[in-house]
Amino acid sequence: MRIKQALKAEGRSQRWVAAQIGMSEATFRRKLADDSFTATQFVQIASALKIDVASLHDFNSADAKAAA
């Protein structure tokens, strides 16, 4: 499950999650668009949404990006 999918599934907005992790909504949106969250931020987002952190990131696509 990706972050946008998780937000929708949990009925939460980007604004809400950004506030929960102490980040501005603009920064959250930029990091979401760039797929540039740190590992710590992934953990914080998963915690805020009460889901498993591994479900937030498609590790296969990250591996494909790294290999390209």
Image (cartoon, rainbow, N blue to C red):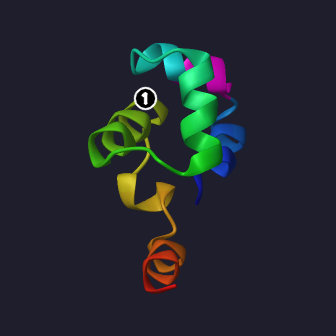
Q: Nearer the viewer, residue 64 or 54?
A: 64
Q: Is residue 17 left or right of residue 50?
A: right
Q: Is residue 1 left or right of residue 20?
A: right
Mark 1 crowd level (few <14, some 14–19, many ≥20, 10 Å Cα) = some
- Residue beneath the point at 63% across and 18% down: 15
Give x and y (percent) for residue 16. Answer: 59, 17
Residue under numbered circle 1: 48
Q: Is residue 63 left or right of residue 32?
A: left
Q: Which residues are magenta?
A: 12-17
- The answer to whether residue 61 is magenta is no
User: Dot 1 lies on which element?
Assistant: helix
Compared with 32, 20 (above or below) is above
The answer to whether residue 43 is seen in the rendering is yes
Extreme residue in the front direction: 68
Compared with 55, 43 (above or below) is above
Q: Nearer the viewer, residue 50 or 20?
A: 20
Compared with 38, 61 (above or below) is below
Q: Nearer the viewer, residue 8 or 40?
A: 40
Query: Label 1 sits on what residue type?
Result: Ala
Give x and y (percent) for residue 53. Answer: 37, 52
Q: Quadrant of the N terminus?
A: bottom right
The answer to whether residue 3 is seen in the rendering is no
- Residue beneath the point at 47% across and 60% down: 55
Give x and y (percent) for residue 4. Answer: 67, 45
- Counting the numbered discs, the total is 1
Q: Nearer the viewer, residue 38 or 21?
A: 38
**Quadrant of the image occupied by residue 22:** top left
- Residue beneath the point at 34% across and 45% down: 38
What main secondary structure does the magenta stretch of the protein show? helix
